[in-house]
Image (tube, helix red, strand yellow):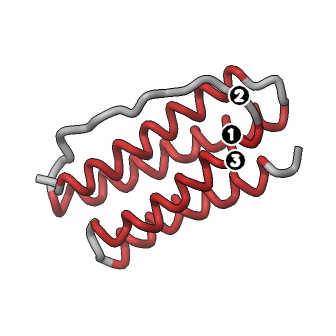
Amino acid sequence: MATPQFTNFLSSLNSCKQQAIVWHNQTTSFSQHTHLNSFYDEILELLDGLVESTAGIYGRPVGYTTHELVDYQSKEQVITYFKKVYDFVQTERANIYQESWIQNQIDEISQLVAETLYLLTLD
């Protein structure tokens, strides 16, 4: 069975995907709308790949949780949120599986968050 730390990592990133969907639906900025759409489409694929590959070695994750979603307030709110997501990924990756192939998949998640942050600043 997957470790609780790994399931917490997945739960947080799944909640991030859901938060991006909420803000995608609420923003009045076309560029934010587009960038958030790209983020949640891509994070879905990256998380699915991470779960499927690790499950072959460590078992299926159980005990998922969800985080409270908040309504869109401002571009600054979204940027601050994604900076926190980036920091979370960088901190928590040390607490989960250390095989290079797993860490490489986490690198792809980090890259997506960083790219999304950059794109959100272009408005």
Residue 85 left/right relative to 78: left
Whether pointer 1 and pointer 3 mark residues with C-beta atoms closer than 8 Å, the reply is yes
- Residue at 39% across, 46% down: 48
Query: Type of residue at label 2?
Result: Gln
In this view, which residue lies farthest toward the right?
Answer: 123
Q: Which residue is mark 2?
A: 73
Q: Residues within 10 Å of mark 2 (few under 14, many from 20)?
A: few
In front of the other: 115 or 26: 26
Point out residue 79 in the picture as x, y percentages from the top left corner. 69, 47
Q: Residues within 10 Å of mark 3 (few under 14, many from 20)?
A: some
Query: Type of residue at label 3?
Result: Ile
In this view, which residue lies farthest toward the left?
Answer: 1
Is residue 116 depicted above or below 91 in this figure? above
Q: Which residue is mark 3?
A: 79
Is residue 83 depicted above or below 100 in this figure? above
Whether pointer 2 and pointer 1 mark residues with C-beta atoms closer than 8 Å, the reply is yes
Is residue 36 depicted above or below 113 in this figure? above
**Regarding mark 3 in the picture, which secondary structure is present there?**
helix
Residue 49 left/right relative to 21: left
